[in-house]
Each structure stands twice: as C-alpha cells, then as structure tokens.
C-alpha cells in the first residue's frame, strides 16, 4: 500500500532543539557530510515540513538544516552557519530490528523526548511516501514534487537504499528508478537535474532520463533536493569493469573506444541543447589563472609536489602562449567530473553516463560555466591511468592503449580527435592530476602515489598519447 502525505504542516523549531544534541554526533559521521575535521556546534533551521506528523505512530520530518561549524579546526575558532543539509528523519516509539542500523538516537528533551529518531531513507514506508509524492506531483509546504508525465511511474515499486559509498543518498525503486536525494543543498539550478533534462530533450540515450524531481522553494530561491532517474538494471560501472578485465588479462580497448563514443555523443547533444561560447585569450587567461591557483594551493598542501611545480606550470604557460598567439577554443556545458566510476555498462554492453553534479566542492555558478570538452576527456584519461596503477603488477602499456582507444572513439563520433589539441589536453590533464593529489592527500593517502606518478610524467612535458 502506498503512503501519502497526511499533514502538510510546517513543523515547530522546538523539534530541532530536541534533535540538536543527537545530530551533532550523527551528522559528522555521515559519508556525505562535507565539513569533516571541524566539530558541529549547532544548527539553524532553513525549512521543515512534517510529511507525517511527528506525534503519530510513525512521524516523518523533512528538514533543511544549516550546520554551524568553526572555520578552522584550531581550538577556540568561532563557529559560523555553514553548509545546508537535507535530512529525512523518522520518529517512532521503538525501532523494528531491521531499522536498527538507521538509529540516530533518543532525544532527551523537547517534544521528541522519549521517542526514537532515525534516518528514514532506510524505512520502506518513508521511501514509498516519497515515490507517491513524485507520482502524484504533491506540493507540501516548501516542498514541490514534480514528474515527467510521459514516463509511467508505478506505485508498487519496492524500495531499497543504495549502500555503496556515495556523496549523496539514493533509493532504488523496483530496479526501475533510482532517486538521488542531494545532501548538501545549494540554491539555484543544479546541473544534476539540468543536464539530464536537457539531454532527454535531445533524445540522447547515453544518460538516463529524469522521471521526477523534488525541489524546495525558499525565500525566492529554488533548491534542487532530489532527482528520480531511470535505473540502469544489471549495470557494472566502468571502474569495476576495468579492474576485472585487468585481473583477467583481458583487453579493454574495445570498451575504452565505446566510452569515447558515448562521451562524444553526450558532448554533441549538450552542445546542441545549451549555449556554447568561444574562448579567446582573456577567457583562457582566466581559466589558466584558476589552474595556477590550484597548483599553488596544492604545492602548499602537499610538499611532495614542489620539485614538479615548474614543469607542471609549463603546461599552463604553454596554453597561455597559444591564446596570446590568437588561438581560440569552443566551450560548452560538460559533465564536469567524469571518470570511470561515472560510466555504467548495461548487460547489452551499452554505456550510460551518470552524476552530472560536477565537482561538489565548487559553487553551482562555476560548475555551470561552459568549458572545453578537453576537461571531461582529461578526466577519463586520468581514470585509465588510475586503473592501470591499481593493478599488480603494473601493466605499463594498458593505460596507453585505453587512452588512445578512448580518443579514437571520441573522434569517430565528434569528428574531433582530442589528441589534435595536445597543449589543451596536457593542461587539463595536469590540472586534474593536481586535483587528484589534493583529493588523495585528504581522503586516501595510500593512493597518493597514483596521481604523483602522473605529475612526474606530466611535468616532463609528455602529452597524452
Ligand atoms: N541511473 C542509474 N542506474 C543504475 N545505477 C545508478 C544510476 N545512477 C546511480 N547509480 C548507482 O548509484 C551510485 C551513486 O550514484 P551517483 O549519481 O554517482 O551518486 P553520488 O552523487 O552520491 O556519488 C553509482 O555509483 C551507481 O552505482
Ligand atoms: O566519485 P566522486 O564524484 O565523489 O569523485 C571523487 O572521488 C573519486 C574516487 O572515488 C576520485 O576519483 C579518482 O579515483 C578514481 C578511482 O577510485 C579514478 O577512477 C579517478 O580517475 C580519480 O580521479 C575523484 O577524483 C574525486 O573527485
């Protein structure tokens, strides 16, 4: 039986006070929490909606809360209202054993005292309610659920939560749809909805079409909160597939070439759907300035980069020189964070690209700027290199062959071989490798040798093959 919203009531701030001590503990432990390393000192409520009344047998609260954190981890640093997060909080007397892992805690004060609160995504009744709200196009308080009525959305799809590590949280419905609930919420147009919608409009089959979306209307701003998308059934992601083929000693160039074709199909459709611009020397200088700033910051943070800095810098200077000589480039909307893990292969062998959110740490306006397609291509070239380096023993020419096949596939569809612009490609690959050095130093120090090996190669001036 499907759940429906019973009480479109905006909830009282007393509820947040009741949850506050529990959330301070729970939030920083979540994979998707962006403010790691700094304590949460409190919350302010941005919006709250009771999807089911909190004092009912099953209560369901939709909260947008701003976490207060000090700007640095230094003792005594002042706390500020920081990132805004989307939370779906269930309230029950007691939790059934199957929901025990979702426990947030037992509030001691305020209206929720004595009850049990938990992460409601894991509760099929809450998941059903979200699907039903999308199906029926419900509006409740500041929350608006919308759908593409051309796609059939059955009400009996059984939900299950995605347990893999991810930056947001997703629920799969009956292996037919997947709902991604964005966790760190920003006002404005979100490319994770904008680009798949634009691609669906262009009938691009390489990106699963959005079937529904969930937004919040707050103080004149719209916040994208969730996207329901066709689920690619039985899919394997490109990263897992590449590692599997490496282990078996199988050739991956056929897949790499197909991935190049898929990327070009998506780029071509995006260039049709959304504006493109020409980058002259002023615009290219601005892009290069960003690359140099990221290099400088990375050298400060990771001293192992220092010996390579001049060589890396030369990759950026070469681009500036070309721009000064009058060369121009086309920029368009791109994926923005493309790597093998963002590519899904279905059992028929067809590839789809997912996760158009861009780099989550960047502001939305920056993520939505037109950019050279070389940026996405460089991301994939780096990914083949990563895959080769995670295999023992290192198969030295595996990445080179995949990288070449990917570029060949890309050229077959787009008519432009990325290798014909080696200076641009080297600059973007260098920028990506520097980003990866920072990422690995922060999150996975064991992986640091992988981008550092690329840094060594790129600083020697060897362009992508
Ligand atoms: N349309 C889809 N079909 C099948 N699986 C998907 C789909 N979208 C996402 N997934 C799975 O969910 C995981 C997380 O999705 P993703 O969009 O990358 O989320 P996040 O932004 O949280 O990292 C992916 O790695 C993939 O395994
Ligand atoms: O998947 P996200 O969008 O959160 O991207 C971040 O994490 C990625 C790792 O999970 C990281 O990707 C790097 O490692 C991958 C292998 O694990 C490799 O395929 C990528 O090429 C490499 O960049 C990504 O950089 C980071 O933003």
Image (cartoon, rainbow, N blue to C red):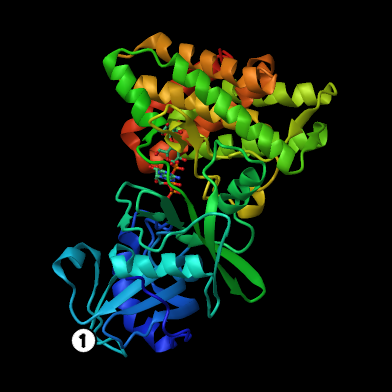
Which residue is at a point 35% across and 11% down the rendered structure image?
395
Q: Residues within 10 Å of mark 1 (few under 14, many from 20)?
A: some
Q: Position of residue 151 (x, y in %)?
A: 53, 54
Q: Check the image and report above or below for 6 versus 195.
A: below
Q: Residue 416 appears at what percent x and percent y?
A: 69, 19
The residue tagged 1 is 114
> Residue 24 location in percent, x, y?
33, 70
Q: Residue at x 36, y 77 (%)?
A: 60
State which quarter of the image contains the C terminus.
top right
Rendered view: 154 above or below 317: below
At a point 57% along the width and 13% down the height, the residue shown is 462
Question: Where ligand 1 lies, by image quadrant?
Answer: top left
> 241 or 447: nearer the eye?
241
Residue closer to the observer: 446 or 84: 84
Residue 174 appears left or right of 264: left
Horizontal and vertical percent for residue 26?
30, 66
**Looking at the rendering, which quadrant does residue 303 occupy?**
top left
Helix, strand or loop at mark 1: loop
Q: Is residue 46 toward the left or the right of residue 393 in the image?
A: right
Q: Is residue 392 visible?
A: no
Q: Residue furthest right?
A: 326
Say whether residue 48 is left or right of residue 417: left
Residue 85 in view, yes or no: yes
Report the residue at 54% width, 32% height from top.
Answer: 432
From the viewer's side, name the closer residue of 144 and 325.
144
């Amino acid at each position: 039986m499907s759940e429906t919203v019973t009480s479109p009531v905006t909830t009282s701030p007393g509820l947040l006070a009741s949850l506050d001590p529990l959330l301070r503990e729970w939030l920083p432990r979540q994979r998707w929490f962006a403010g790691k390393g700094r304590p949460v000192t409190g919350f302010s409520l941005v919006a709250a909606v009771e999807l089911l009344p909190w004092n009912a047998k099953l209560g369901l609260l939709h909260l947008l809360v701003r976490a207060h954190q000090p700007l640095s981890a230094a003792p005594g640093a002042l706390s500020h209202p920081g990132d805004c997060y989307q939370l779906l909080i269930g309230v029950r007397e007691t939790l059934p054993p199957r929901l025990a892992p979702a426990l947030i805690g037992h509030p001691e004060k305020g209206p929720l005292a004595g009850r049990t609160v938990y992460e409601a995504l894991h509760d099929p009744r809450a998941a059903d309610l979200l699907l039903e709200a999308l199906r029926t196009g419900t509006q409740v308080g500041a929350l608006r659920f919308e759908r593409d009525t051309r796609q059939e959305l059955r009400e009996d799809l059984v939900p299950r939560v995605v347990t893999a590590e991810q930056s947001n949280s997703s629920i799969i419905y009956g292996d037919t749809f997947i709902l991604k609930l964005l966790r760190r919420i920003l006002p404005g147009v979100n490319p994770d909805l904008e680009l798949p919608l634009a691609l669906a409009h262009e009938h691009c089959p390489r990106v699963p079409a959005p079937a529904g979306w969930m937004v919040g209307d707050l103080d004149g701003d719209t916040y994208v909160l969730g996207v329901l998308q066709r689920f690619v059934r039985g899919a394997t992601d490109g990263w897992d597939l590449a590692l599997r083929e490496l282990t078996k000693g199988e050739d991956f160039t056929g897949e790499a070439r197909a991935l190049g074709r898929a990327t070009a199909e998506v780029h071509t459709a995006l260039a049709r759907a959304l504006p493109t611009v020409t980058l002259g020397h002023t615009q290219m200088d601005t892009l290069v300035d960003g690359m140099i700033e990221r290099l400088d910051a990375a050298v400060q943070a990771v001293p192992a980069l220092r010996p390579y800095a001049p060589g890396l810098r030369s990759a950026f200077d070469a681009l500036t020189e070309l721009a000064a000589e009058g060369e121009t480039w086309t920029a368009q909307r791109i994926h923005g964070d493309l790597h093998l893990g963002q590519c899904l292969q279905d059992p028929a062998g067809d590839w789809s690209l997912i996760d158009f959110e861009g780099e989550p740490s960047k502001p939305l306006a920056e993520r939505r700027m037109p950019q050279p397609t070389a940026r996405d291509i460089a991301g994939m070239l780096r990914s083949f290199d990563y895959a080769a380096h995670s295999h023992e023993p290192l198969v030295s020419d595996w990445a080179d062959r995949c990288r070449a096949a990917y570029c060949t596939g890309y050229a077959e569809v787009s008519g432009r071989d990325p290798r014909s612009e080696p200076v641009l490609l080297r600059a973007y690959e260098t920028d990506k490798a520097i980003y990866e050095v920072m990422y690995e130093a922060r999150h996975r120090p064991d992986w640091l040798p992988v981008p550092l090996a690329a840094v060594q190669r790129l600083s020697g001036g060897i362009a992508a093959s």
